[in-house]
Amino acid sequence: MTNGQAPIEKNEYYDVTFEDLTHDGAGVAKINGFPIFVPNGLPDELAKIKVVKVKKGYGFGRLIEIYEKSQYRVDAPCPLFKECGGCQLQHLSYEGQMIAKRKQVQEVLTRIGKLKEVKVHPVLGMEHPWRYRNKAQVPVADREGGLIAGFYQQRSHEIIDMEACLIQQEKNDEVVQVVKKICEKYGVQAYDEKNHRGTLRHIMARYGLVTGEVMVVLITRTKELPNKNKILSDIVDQLPDVKSVVQNINPKRTNVIFGDETTVLWGEEYIYDNIGNIRFAISARSFYQVNPEQTKVLYDKALEYAQLTGEETVIDAYCGIGTISLFLARKAKKVYGVEIVPEAIEDAKRNASLNDITNAEFAVGEAEVVIPNWKKEGIRADVIVVDPPRKGCDEALLQTIIEMKPKRVVYVSCNPATLARDLRILEDGGFQTVEVQPVDMFPQTVHVECVALMSRVEK
């Protein structure tokens, strides 16, 4: 590359070999060292591409022809795979996905965390990596006089009408289709985001994998729902597993799905599900892991890394509705959970009570504020567990962990890049990363969860 000029030109064709995948599943090739990102390309494939956009330091291309296919390339089973933005890796065999996800974790630990020697185990995948999601939130639109429900097309707000999603539980597909037809039958109009008119914004279905219980949530722009009683009667009649029908009202011009007001129209406020031997009450707005089968795999690993004997005090930062806390409480002396969302803490307390767990205590607030206060009160943590959002741990929390000097830190992460960054900070603060275990919570997508074990270095 000379004079800052890119060695490629828009609308030109090039032969390339893909070297890697981006974090959103596109193939990465380099032309004279200049990276170009091409959707649907897979590592080790030789292909012809067309350049469609050139930026200062990288470009984007379109796949024209594959000369040599990857040994892991497969035909995507979903007919909407290339249009829908929900899955990114259906064209990569499950074995190939496991290899790519482990490599992604290894690379960011080395590049961002400077952790070259850390053992990264092979990814713990699913025996049947389809039909795993227990929650569907599906936008609704009017099309030629009828209702359609589906997912947004890639990089757009155009809804693709969809009768089945291969990563959803079949029960959720059934619920969405039945509810859509019932609403259509009674003349419910879909929300029009351009004109801010109409009633029905989203249909949501929640399914208890172990209990078989179903919750239907109708997310509407208006409090009024035309023919509400007839709609409820038909839902209950046609879907016998439904235990709860809820309306959430969102009158705002926004892409945020939920509004502030939630009303139970029929049945219970909660449905129930189990992960292992822990029972959870799930409301319309509860955060609950969408792949409970793999959640147990993830939490079993976190529990193994915590190395509890029954004598330890554990702090669970970012505890949510208490999912990890309650697993830990069965093996620990005492667990303290902290979470910034008040409703989640109410759910956590309810779930502790539901399981007769009395050695778990929950507080609302920012972990980096609450945990130092606990320290002042004389609470000493033997183990600290963190399960932060994608942006990773707050820097003040990491400093708090360093100051508290627990024997072990168990870091559960949904973003390998921020995991690597935070492990580096903890390493510089006196901890050593022992090992990292990736877990595939979202097969057919680019996402990978990890559990990392850190031990304090005795000086």
Image (cartoon, rainbow, N blue to C red):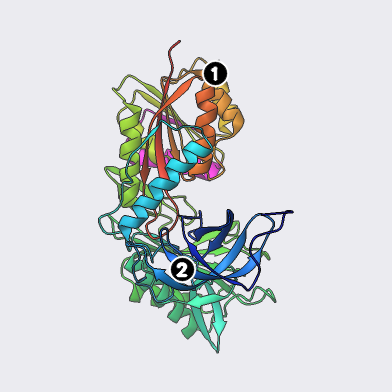
Cα separation, mark 2 vs mark 1, equals 53 Å
Can residue 357 be seen in the rendering of this structure? no
User: Mark 2 sits on what residue?
Assistant: 47
Question: Is the residue marked by circle 2 packed among few (<14), some (14-19), or many (20+) residues within 10 Å?
Answer: many
Can residue 269 be seen in this snapshot? Answer: yes
Above or below, 363 relative to 57? above
**Amino acid type, mark 1:** Glu
Residue 19, compared with residue 83, is above or below; it is above
Q: Among all residues in the image, which is located at the extreme bottom?
A: 144
- Percent of width and height locating residue 351: 39, 42
Q: Nearer the viewer, residue 348 or 403?
A: 403
- The quarter of the rendered structure image containing the N terminus is bottom right
Of the two numbered discs 2 and 1 on the same chain, state the one appearing first in sequence: 2
Residue type (three-letter) at the residue carrying disc 2? Ala
Identify the residue position indicated by label 1 in the image: 403
Up-down relation of residue 250 to residue 451 (above or below): below
Binning the other alpha carbons within 10 Å of mark 1 as few (below 14), some (14 to 19) or many (20 upward) gives few
Q: Which residues are magenta?
A: 341-362
- Quarter holding the C terminus is top left
Residue 240 percent location from the top left of the image:
31, 70
For the point 49% across and 41% down, which residue is it? 108
Q: Is residue 65 left or right of residue 72?
A: right
